[in-house]
Amino acid sequence: MSSGGDNHHLHNGDEPKRDEPTTPRVLTILSCVLEKLVARNDQLVLGSAQLGKSLSAFHGVRAPSITIPNYMERIYKYTNCSPSCFVVGYVYIDRLVHKYPDSLVVSLNVHRLLVTSVMVASKILDDVHYNNAFYARVGGVSNTELNKLEIELLFLLDFGVTVSSRVFESYCQHLENEMLWNDATRVIERLAISNSVDDVTEISVEDTQTSSPPQIVD
């Protein structure tokens, strides 16, 4: 990912190697929720909906090619942050959505919102965490940009980064309900196509597993 005048790319060998972790279930649920949200909002934007400027600092010139699930797995794999950081990061994003309803989470800003929110959450939750420079390399942005995005996020939230156990549990329950609903929907879809011919599944080079971070280009 890169912003208008600040191109910053990841190259193989720039990062320490990580063992391949098992993707926590919460990441799968969150990525599904965010993909649905972004798809809906992108359609609203195409329908000439006016975007507010509150989240403009997080907007890229174009949407990154890396998918939301792959991006979240990348952050988890290389930063070793706890899965709870992703839930709290989602709480931050949801607070922004409710506080600035005219500003939508879309494909142009969701990646920067994610890496910034998870990084801030890791500083709150995890006893040991990587610094901004490392998160920037993993997230595909420059350290300077991520520093600015962190400050922007904190001010947009009025520095309200505390999440009570009650709120945390309520979001976990919400995400669990979302997964149950999606599972039920998939069962219905599978029944509907059970007699059809399966399509050939193609796996692109971006989806293959490597021991070091692939380059992110936007």
Image (cartoon, rainbow, N blue to C red):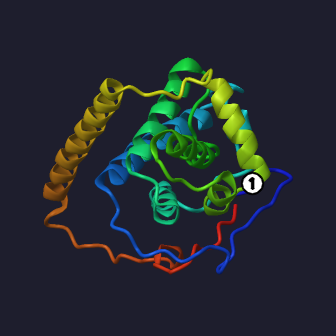
- Outermost residue to the front: 127
The relative height of residue 49 versus residue 129 in the rendered view (above or below) is above
Q: Quadrant of the N terminus?
A: bottom right
Q: Quadrant of the C terminus?
A: bottom right
Seen from the viewer's position, the closer of residues 48 and 105 is 105
Image x and y of residue 26, in percent: 33, 49
- Outermost residue to the right: 5
Image x and y of residue 58, in percent: 68, 40
Would you identify the image quadrant in which residue 155 lies?
top right
Seen from the viewer's position, the closer of residues 44 and 61 is 61
Q: Residue at x 67, y 56 (%)?
A: 136
Residue 50 showing in the rendered view: no
Seen from the viewer's position, the closer of residues 11 and 42 is 11
Seen from the viewer's position, the closer of residues 147 and 66 is 147
Answer left or right for 70 relative to 200.
right
Secondary structure category for the residue under label 1: helix
The relative height of residue 177 versus residue 18 in the rendered view (above or below) is above
Give the labeled residue for mark 1: 143
Image x and y of residue 213, in percent: 58, 73
Q: Residue at x 71, y 47 (%)?
A: 146
Q: Amino acid at mark 1?
A: Asn
Answer left or right for 158 relative to 85.
right
Q: Residue at x 75, y 56 (%)?
A: 142
Answer left or right for 133 relative to 194.
right
Residue 8 showing in the rendered view: yes
Q: Residue at x 71, y 56 (%)?
A: 141
- Rate crowding at label 1 as few (under 14), some (14 to 19) or many (20 or more) other CA atoms within 10 Å: some
Image x and y of residue 148, in percent: 75, 40
Please count the marks in the image: 1
